[in-house]
Image: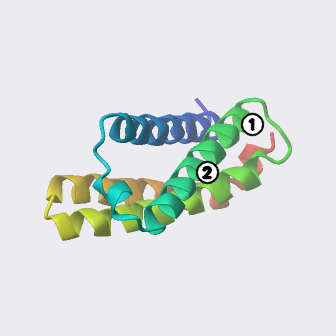
Amino acid sequence: MNIRKISALYSLFLGLSILGMWSFFLFSNQVPELNSGSAEIFFHLFAEFLTAVFLIVSGISLLRKASFSFHLFLVSLGMVLYTVIVSAGYYVDLGEFAMVAMFTILQILTLAFIVVALLKSNQFNS
C-alpha cells in the first residue's frame, strides 16, 4: 500500500470518527455546555464538523487522485492538529487522562502524517 492510500484511510478514519463521536455525544445529551448559553460550544462544534468534512473530502480526493488532494489533506491535518490539542486541554481540566492520552497519540500520528506527506509529496501526485 502506498503513502497516498494510507493517508486517505487515515483521513477517512478520523473524519468518520469525529462525526460519529460528536453525533453520539449530541444525541445522548452528553454535551452539558449546550445548556450554558455560551456561543463557544457552537463555534467549537462548527469547527469539529468542518474538520470532519474536510478530512472525508480529502480522503476521497486522495483515493481518486484529484489534483487538489495533497493540499486539502495538509489543510485538514492542520485542522485536526488544532482540534486534538484543544480537546486534550479540555480533558486535562476534567481529569480524564485516558482521553488526554488518546488525543496525545492522535497529535503524534497527525504530526507524523504531516511530516511524511511533506517529505514524500511527489508520491501524492503519481
Q: Is residue 109 above or below residue 15?
A: below
Q: Residue lying farthest right?
A: 67
User: Marks 1 and 2, Cα distance to the nearest angstrom?
Assistant: 16 Å
Name the foreground residue: 120 vs 94. 94
Tell me which amino acid carries mark 2: Leu
Q: Residue at x 73, y 45 (%)?
A: 124
* Residue 23 picture location, percent across and down: 43, 36
- Local packing at callout 2 (Cα closer than 10 Å; few below 14, some 14-19, many 20+) is some
The circle on residue 39 is none
For residue 63, side relative to residue 27 (left or right): right
Label 2 belongs to which residue?
A: 50
Q: Nearer the viewer, mark 1 or mark 2?
A: 2
Rendering quarter of residue 85:
bottom left
The N terminus lies in which quarter of the figure? top right
Q: Is residue 117 left or right of residue 68?
A: left
Q: Position of residue 74 (x, y in %)?
A: 66, 57
Q: Is residue 79 left or right of residue 98?
A: right
